[in-house]
Image (cartoon, rainbow, N blue to C red):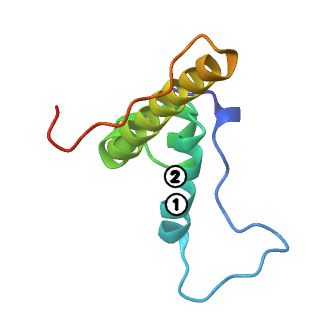
Amino acid sequence: MPSPGLCRVGGPTPGVERIPGIGPRHKRHAFAPLLIAKRLNVVFVSCQLGHASPAITLRVCAHLFEQADHAAAARDALEASYAAMASGTGAWPMPVSAGST
């Protein structure tokens, strides 16, 4: 179980106006992808979303963690490719023709 200091304490934020029709669930749907895209620990994300356990977070948000992993891998591959091209040690990528696999 995470340490008590890791999890947020619920309740309204002082000085922040409520928006009619926007409740905690809407905020979680906007907040979860931001936390996960930053590749934060699932336990921390679970606490921030108010889930009872990280298992719930994984069940509900597994696709977001997969997307973040895929995006990070693609970013790393592109950065390595461009670094190789910029240093002159790599070749420019060749376009793939429609008929080739």
Q: Is residue 87 left or right of residue 62?
A: right
Q: Position of residue 85 (x, y in %)?
A: 60, 22
Give above or below for 82 relative to 22.
above
| Residue 53 visible, this angle | no
Q: Is residue 77 left or right of residue 86?
A: left
Q: Is residue 6 left or right of residue 36?
A: right
Which residue corresponds to the image point at 54% horizontal and 75% vertical from the top-left? 23
| Marks 1 & 2, CB-CB < 8 Å contact | yes
Q: For mark 2, does the 10 Å Cα neighbourhood hold few (<14), some (14 to 19), or many (20 or more) residues? A: some
Q: Which residue is mark 1?
A: 28
Which residue corresponds to the image point at 52% horizontal and 60% vertical from the top-left? 28
| Residue 101 visible, this angle | yes
Q: Position of residue 51 (x, y in %)?
A: 45, 47
Which residue corresponds to the image point at 79% horizontal and 74% vertical from the top-left? 16
What SS does tag 1 mark? Answer: helix
Q: Position of residue 80 (x, y in %)?
A: 57, 20
Give above or below for 30 relative to 66.
below
Residue 55, quarter of the rendered image: top left
Residue 52, quarter of the rendered image: top left
Q: Which residue is mark 2?
A: 32
As measured in the structure, the alpha-carbon distance from the residue carrying label 1 to the one carrying label 2 is 6 Å
- What amino acid does circle 2 point to? Ala
Give above or below for 48 relative to 85.
below
- What amino acid does circle 1 point to? Arg
Which residue corresponds to the image point at 20% horizontal and 44% vertical from the top-left? 98
Q: Position of residue 77 (x, y in %)?
A: 49, 25
